[in-house]
Amino acid sequence: MVKLRLKRQGKKFQPHYRIVAVKARTKRDGESLEDLGHYSPMSKELVINKDRVEYWLGVGAQPTDTVKGLLIKEGIVKKDKNTKVYNKPPKQKSQERAAAAEEKAKEEEPVEEPKNEESTSEESSE
C-alpha cells in the first residue's frame, strides 16, 4: 500500500516538510517513491505538484489526515463529512476558554469588604 505523507526536514524548532509518496511500512524519514511538494508550517508556504498527487490518488494511494487537510485547502481533494480541517490555531481557543473562565470566576465570587486592621485593634483595646 502506498501512502501520501509528510517527511520531516529542517532544523530544530524550524520544521519543514516534504509531501511524499512512500510505502506504508517505510520509516517517517525513510526512502520515498516520489517527492510531491513541500510545506512549511512556520511561513504557511505550501507547494504541491497537483498532477502527480492526482496520479497517486488515482492508483490508490491513501493520504494521511494531515496531508488530506492540505490537499483540501489546495482544492485537490473534496472534503467529506468525516474529515476535519483546522482553520483556527488551538491557542485562540484556549485563550477564549481562559477568558470565559475568568469572567465566570468574577461573577461567582462574592465581593468582600476589606477589614481595617486599625478598627479591630481599637475595639479590642477598649
Image (tube, rainbow, N blue to C red):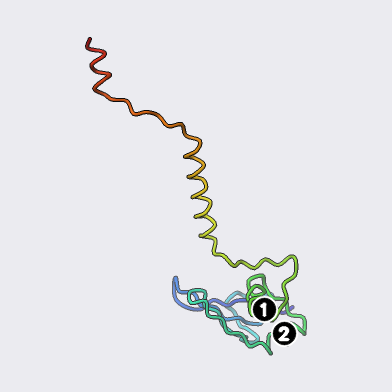
Q: Secondary structure at mark 1?
A: strand
At 49% from the left and 44% from the top, the residue drawn is 103
Please rate how many residues cluster around mark 1, counting C-alpha atoms within 10 Å: few if below 14, some from 14 to 19, many from 20: many
Instruction: From the viewer's side, name the closer residue of 54 and 116.
Output: 116
Task: Identify which amino acid the numbered label 2 is placed on.
Answer: Trp
Number of numbered markers: 2
At 56% from the left and 65% from the top, the residue drawn is 88
Task: Identify which amino acid the numbered label 1 is placed on.
Answer: Leu
Q: Give the image location of residue 74, x and y in percent.
A: 64, 80
At 52% from the left and 74% from the top, the residue drawn is 41
For marks 2 and 1 on the same chain, the one whose residue lies earlier in the sequence: 1
Image quadrant assignment for residue 8? bottom right
Query: Mark 2 highlights which residue?
Result: 56
Query: Mark 1 highlights which residue?
Result: 4
At 71% from the left and 78% from the top, the residue drawn is 77
Q: Are marks 2 and 1 in contact (CB under 8 Å)?
A: yes
Q: Give the CA separation, mark 2 to mark 1.
A: 8 Å
Q: Give the image location of residue 115, x and y in percent.
A: 32, 25
Q: Secondary structure at mark 2?
A: helix
Left or right side of 12 for 114: left
Q: Give the image location of residue 52, x and y in percent.
A: 68, 89
Q: Give the image location of residue 47, x and y in percent.
A: 57, 84
Instruction: From the viewer's side, name the closer residue of 2 and 50.
Output: 50
